[in-house]
Amino acid sequence: AIMQQDSLVRLSVENWSDLQEAFMTDWPRGISGYTILDTQRRWLEECFDYGFKVFCPFGDLWSGMVAINEKDAFYEIVLQCPRNDTSKLEEALKTTNVIDWQRNIIIPFAPSHIIESVKKIADDVNVDIELILPSNSFILDKQSPQFDVSLPSSITFGLLTPKHIELVDSTWPHRYPGSTWYFQLLVKTRSGFGLFKDQDLVSWVFINEAGTLGHMYTLEDHRRKSYGELLLKSVSNVLLKERKDVFAFSVKGNESACNLYRKVGFKNFDGVAWCYLKGKSK
């Protein structure tokens, strides 16, 4: 019997840069697709491979990207498309065997044309859309000058280490069984940054596996001291030094975070949403 090729064709790491070029033509909407490939390539070069895989519908870059980003028990499918026409992407999603639609699936930072695609195919792949969580997107252009940051004398800025994981996980509102595994990965890849007061961690932020700022948090007793702003500027400088755009998502309604990004000079651009799917019982 001839093996029928799957509608989603695996894209090798050597060809990710072609897909990144496609996303660059669709800026700023294509930033998430571009940046996740950038970050994952760096991690692979440093030998942090946890199974992130990239596919294109029928092998065509312009028809979009389907990436499997499995984080322990967390099954994330990244869907992005550099064009408005998502018909090929939809066709591929309906027939592929690469995705296990019966699992609980999260589709992160999906632009509006992707959300519409998911709505169109939900019945075909036998899933219910449980929740669509809209988010604001904020971007600081890589051409921006670095911030002039002066930290108070008892405060230092530095990398998180494994001993901080327990604290970070315990305060994360979205923690799930296995999220410590996720924070371990981010700490190992030197992606966690914090402000330390006399060596104790008081405020932190991560550059996650998609290259976006996330999990920003300041301990209750240390709020209203502008630590969030100092931390945001310090971590932005790390990326700006590497000539990288700095970008972040903030759930709609989280006014304090949105105000902070605006205050520091980030531009708000088209919103995205997180889409939660659940397989219908057979």
Image (spheres, rainbow, N blue to C red):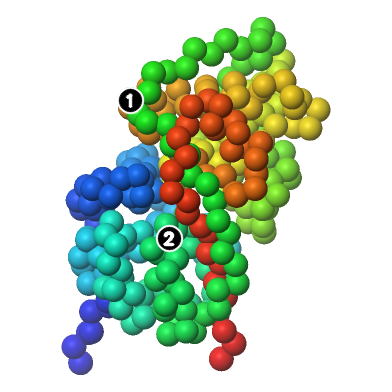
Q: Does residue 244 appear to the left or right of 132 in the view shown? A: left
Q: Residue 39 in the image: state x and y as whole percent.
A: 38, 42
**Badge 1 amino acid:** Gln
Mark drawn on residue 112: 2
Q: Residue 10 in the image: state x and y as whole percent.
A: 27, 65
Asked whether 113 or 53 is in front, the reply is 113
| Residue indicated by mark 1 | 143
Q: Residue 33 in the image: state x and y as whole percent.
A: 35, 51
Instruction: Examine the image and state in which quarter residue 24 appears.
Output: top left
Asked whether 181 or 280 is in front, the reply is 280
Seen at 57% across and 44% down, the residue is 250
Circles 1 and 2, Cβ within 8 Å, touching? The answer is no
Q: Residues within 10 Å of mark 1 (few under 14, many from 20)?
A: few
Seen at 53% across and 64% down, the residue is 275
**Badge 2 amino acid:** Ser
Secondary structure of the residue carrying numbered label 1: loop
Instruction: Examine the image and state in which quarter residue 194 appears.
Output: top right
- Mark count: 2
Residue 20 shows in the view: no
